[in-house]
């Protein structure tokens, strides 16, 4: 008989990422419109499982990105704790290299 497969891939998300922090968001969109997108005082949060980063600023729609798509976290005026904790989640090779069926087995 085979043993039931248990795969512990969840990294605990630090509380400061789930409560959120206010940052300015800047996105360079050179190829399409030759303009830059800037949002002042956007509230950034990470979901409880560490899958998504979402943000919302006043007067604009919110936006979401999967953290598995984040490849670079640059230090601007960012608090060091946010940068360090986001890297902890985005560099989780166990979560990004499992099959979709295992990803659906959230605890």
Image (cartoon, helix red, strand yellow):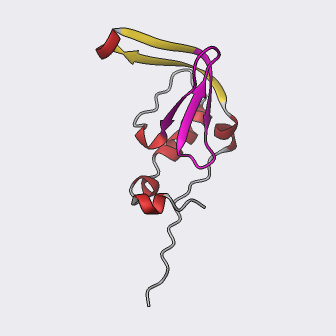
Please state, as top left, top right, bottom left or bottom right, where the N terminus lies in the image. bottom left
Residue ID at (56%, 46%): 50
Q: Nearer the viewer, residue 5 or 86?
A: 5
What x and y, as percent, mark residue 15? Answer: 69, 43
Q: Nearer the viewer, residue 29 or 23?
A: 29
Residue ID at (60%, 22%): 23
74 drawn magenta: no
Please state, as top left, top right, bottom left or bottom right, where the C terminus lies in the image. bottom right
Task: Give the image quarter of residue 100.
Answer: bottom left
The residue lying furthest to the bottom in this view is 1
Task: Give the image quarter of residue 10.
Answer: bottom right
Is 36 above or below relative to 55?
above
What x and y, as percent, mark residue 26? Answer: 48, 17
Residue ID at (47%, 51%): 92
Q: Is residue 54 left or right of residue 35?
A: right
Is 3 above or below relative to 51?
below
**For the image shown, how many numbered marks are present on the structure?**
0
What x and y, as percent, mark residue 81? Answer: 61, 35
Q: Nearer the viewer, residue 72 or 41?
A: 41
65 drawn magenta: yes
Q: Which residues are magenta?
A: 40-66
What x and y, as percent, mark residue 88? Answer: 52, 46
The residue lying furthest to the left in this view is 31
């Amino acid at each position: 008989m085979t043993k039931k497969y248990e795969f512990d891939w969840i990294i605990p998300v630090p509380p400061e990422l789930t409560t959120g922090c206010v940052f300015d968001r800047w996105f360079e969109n050179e190829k399409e419109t030759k303009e830059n997108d800037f949002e002042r005082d956007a509230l950034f949060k990470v979901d409880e499982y560490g899958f998504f980063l979402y943000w919302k600023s006043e007067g604009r729609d919110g936006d979401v990105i999967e953290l598995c798509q984040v490849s670079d976290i640059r230090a601007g005026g960012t608090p060091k704790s946010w940068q360090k904790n986001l890297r902890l989640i985005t560099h989780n090779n166990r979560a990004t290299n499992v099959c979709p069926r295992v990803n659906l087995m959230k605890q």
